[in-house]
Image: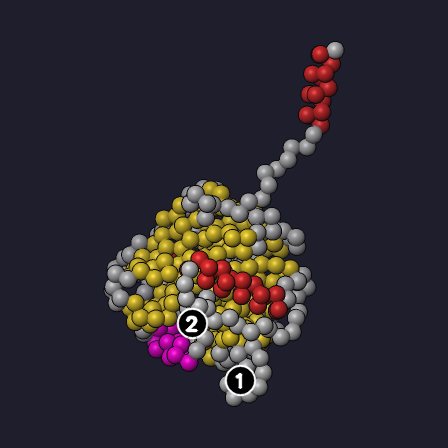
Amino acid sequence: MRLNSVLLAAVVLAASPVLADPPELAFNPAGKGCYEFDTGVVKGTLRNQVLSSLIHLASGMEVVNSNGLGVFGYYRVFSSGTRYGERVYHRPAVSKLLRDGAVEVHWPAAEEHPLEITGIYRWSAPDTLDLETIVTLRRDMPRFEVFLASYVAKDFRGWVYVKPNDHGAGTPGFLSADVNPLVEGSYLMFPLHREAAPMIFDGRWEHPPSPVQWSVTRRLAAPMALRRHRPSGVTIVQMATPEDCFAVAMSYNKEPRDDVSNHFSMYLSLFGRDLKAGETARAHSRFVIGQNLGNRRAVELYNEFLKKRKSLAGHGTHRQPPSATGTH
C-alpha cells in the first residue's frame, strides 16, 4: 500500500506543469555588460548602455528601432557652445547590478569628456522604467546639458505636450508633431521656457560630425512627449521633471518618409543650468509603455511622477500641468 502511494505521488508530480518564475521588477545578468528583464508587461535587454530590446508582451511588439541605437541612452553632453565627444553610450563604461535589481552604469571622466556620468535604470512598475542621471564635473560648464535619446520602432507617431499660443485662448494639450513646409528637413525642439531657447542655438549643435538643424515651434506645458502606434494602440510616454529638463525634441511625422521622419526619435534635454567644477547634480526621467493609453491618462501618469519625486525629495514644490484635452 505504501509503495502504491509513493508511485501515485510520483505520477502526479510528473504530470504537473513546471511553473515558470513569476515576473519581477528587476534586471538579471545575461553576460558581460548585458542584463535581461521580464516584468510581465515587457521583456527585453539592457546592452551597451541602452535598452536594445523592449517587447510589449500583450501585443508582441518590439518597441525599439532596429537601427541599434536603443531607448533611454545617453547620447551627447554639452555646455555653452561646446560638445564633449560624440556619443556617450559608445564610450567605455562599467555596469553593475544593484541589490534591488536596478542596473548602474558609470562612465569615468576622460580628457575629451571631463565629467563622470552615472545612470541608474530601475523598474518602478511593470510598465515603468525610471532613470536617475548623476553627473560630477571636472571643469566649469555653463548651460550644461545631457541629451538623452530614444529611437523607437517604425510607424510610432509623435506627440508633444505643449502650451497654447502665448497670446491666445486655450489649454495645454498634446500636439501631433507633423511636418509642414517651415520645418521640413529639420528636427523639432520644444523648449520649456523662454530662457531655454538660446541654449539650443548657442553653437552646441554646430560641431561636426553630425551637426543637427533644429526648428523651435511651441513651448512645453511640461517635459513630456509620447509616440503611439495607432494600429495596435501601443503607446510610449517619455517624461522628466521640470526642474531637471529644459526641452523635449523629436523627429516629425511625415508620409512618405524622409530622412528626418524615418528616424522615429525622442529626446530629453536634461539639466540646462550652470554647473561648477566638482559639483554633483542629479536629474530624473521616466519611460512608460502601455496599450490604448490615452492623452488624459498620460497627463495623470506625469502628475503621479511629479508627486512621487516630491515625496522622495521631501521638500520643495513641483509645477503641476493642467489636464490634457481630448483622448485617443
Residue 197 in the image: x percent, y percent? 41, 79
Name the residue tied to disc 1. Answer: 165
Q: Which of 260 and 192 is in front in this view?
A: 192
Q: Nearer the viewer, residue 122 or 112?
A: 122
Q: Is residue 236 above or below residue 159?
A: above
Q: Specify few, some or many for label 1: CA neighbours under 10 Å numbering under 14, 14-19, or 20 or more.
A: few
Residue 106 in sight here? yes
Residue 72 in sight here? no
Q: Residue at x 40, y 59 (%)?
A: 133
Task: Identify the image quadrant of residue 117.
Answer: bottom left
Q: Is residue 100 left or right of residue 64?
A: left
Residue 281 in the image: x percent, y percent? 34, 62
Q: What stretch is highlighted in magenta?
A: 194-209
Q: Specify few, some or many for label 2: CA neighbours under 10 Å numbering under 14, 14-19, or 20 or more.
A: many
Q: Is residue 261 above or below residue 31?
A: below
Q: Which residue is drawn at 60% across and 51% down?
A: 41
| Circle 1: residue type | Asn
Name the residue tied to disc 2. Answer: 246
Instruction: Give the CA separation, mark 2 to mark 1.
Output: 18 Å
| Circle 2: residue type | Phe
Residue 44 in the image: x percent, y percent? 54, 49
Which of marks 1 and 2 precedes in the sequence? 1
Task: Identify the image quadrant of residue 245.
Answer: bottom left
Is residue 205 shown in magenta? yes
Q: What element carries label 1?
A: loop
Is residue 103 shown in magenta? no
Q: Which of 289 and 302 is in front in this view?
A: 302
Residue that protrudes farthest toward the bottom in the picture? 167
Q: Is mark 2 on a helix, strand or loop?
A: strand
Q: Which of 123 and 106 is in front in this view?
A: 123
State the quadrant of the N terminus.
top right
